[in-house]
Amino acid sequence: MPVAQSGVLTGIPSPAQHTWYLGIFPLRAYALAILAGIVVGLWLTARRWKARGGNPEDVLEIAFWAVPFGIVGGRLYHVLSSPDRYFGENFSGGGDPVRALYVWEGGLGIWGAVALGAVGAWLGCRRQGVRLSSFADAAAPGLLLAQAVGRLGNWFNQELYGRPTELPWGLHIDAGYLVTNPATGVPYPEGTLFHPTFLYELVWNLVMVAALLFLDRRFRLGHGRVFWAYVLLYTLGRVWIEMLRIDDAEVVAGLRLNVWTSILLGLAALVVSVVLARRFPTRETSVRLRPGDGEPPAGSPAEPAPDPGAEGTGAAEAEPEESRTAAVEESDADASART
């Protein structure tokens, strides 16, 4: 529990319970946080999709494909990036591969969720006849909002916390959830405070939601530019937050795998953002793949409508000229006959 110093409560307590039961049915805080994140993310996406000229009902249809794909992708990324628990060290077989199915224990890698979720979103967008890039722009702030809410599940599970700290907002972890100190080979002692990385990312994500909404409203971004801004801004925060964490993870060249992933994706997002800004300085005019009658294709300027009287005017001007020519020829013929 938090320690009171001079009447001031220090430290953030961890929830005493992460699962409740309705009869024999468990209600897990992690699952509830993920579901709540999905709900608020879809709510924001539907509002933005409607504002861009889309049908709000499209969002649920696309989510029907994107959400399951995203959950599977997130779990696959987590298992492959932290394989020791499931397959043993160096894939020796000493792990418990069945636990890879225990999603409620935590462990959804955001980049796997985004990558495979994008495949599901593409399928949904094709079925609805809308542009994936337009939908991704509408969904980007909602993704960040969903991630922020979902981080509460890590708090309830007492997982993915950072290294020890003496800061007043350090996180208390119960004895059963303390990880091993790599310097001593034994778990950290009870009462140790840790960086609440779940809270850092929650706050960072909420601030970036506000930043994306501002940038999109100010510059009317389109053609996927909001989505790539989301990738860039999220990775900026994920790099330093990830470097605080002390849970087991694959290490490559002295850095956690997720740090390298964030660095590479951040650089890629920066390059793509610059290219898109030069190629598509304005937002697309339609979110649909095949615009309806009277609706111009996305990104193409409307052609000026022809003057409905132009053809008639030309014909009217030609007719008097022909009449005058015929009259002159007839007059010359009459003069010759008289001569």
Image: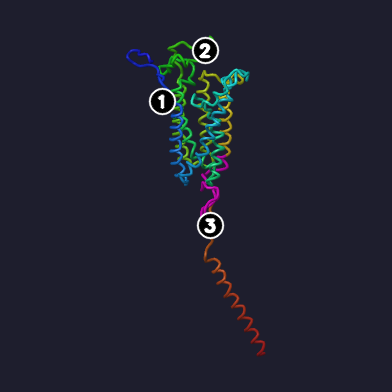
| Image quarter hosting the C terminus | bottom right
Residue type at mark 3? Pro
Give the numbered dot on residue 181: 2
Q: Residues within 10 Å of mark 2 (few under 14, many from 20)?
A: some
Q: Quadrant of residue 145?
A: top left
Label located before the other in sequence (3 or 2): 2
Instruction: Give the residue number, with chain letter if any, for mark 3.
Output: 304
Q: Quadrant of the N terminus?
A: top left
**Comes first in the chain, label 2 or label 1:** 1
Is the residue 1 above or below the residue 218 in the image?
above
Q: Which mark is residue 21?
A: 1
Mark 2 residue type: Asn
Judging depth in this view, the residue of 240 and 121 nearest the camera is 121
Residue 277, magenta (yes or no): yes
Give how far apart the Cα atoms at labels 2 and 1 are: 34 Å
Q: CA distance from mark 3 to mark 2?
A: 71 Å
Return the mark for residue 300.
Answer: none
Q: Are marks 3 and 1 in contact (CB under 8 Å)?
A: no
Tell me residue 298's x, y (percent): 54, 48
| 2 and 1 marks in contact (CB < 8 Å) | no
Nearer to me, 331 or 80: 80
Magenta part mainly helix, strand or loop? Answer: loop
Q: Is residue 175 magenta?
A: no
In the image, the segment drawn in magenta is 276-300
| Location of residue 172 in the rendering, given as x and y in whole percent from the top left corner | 42, 16
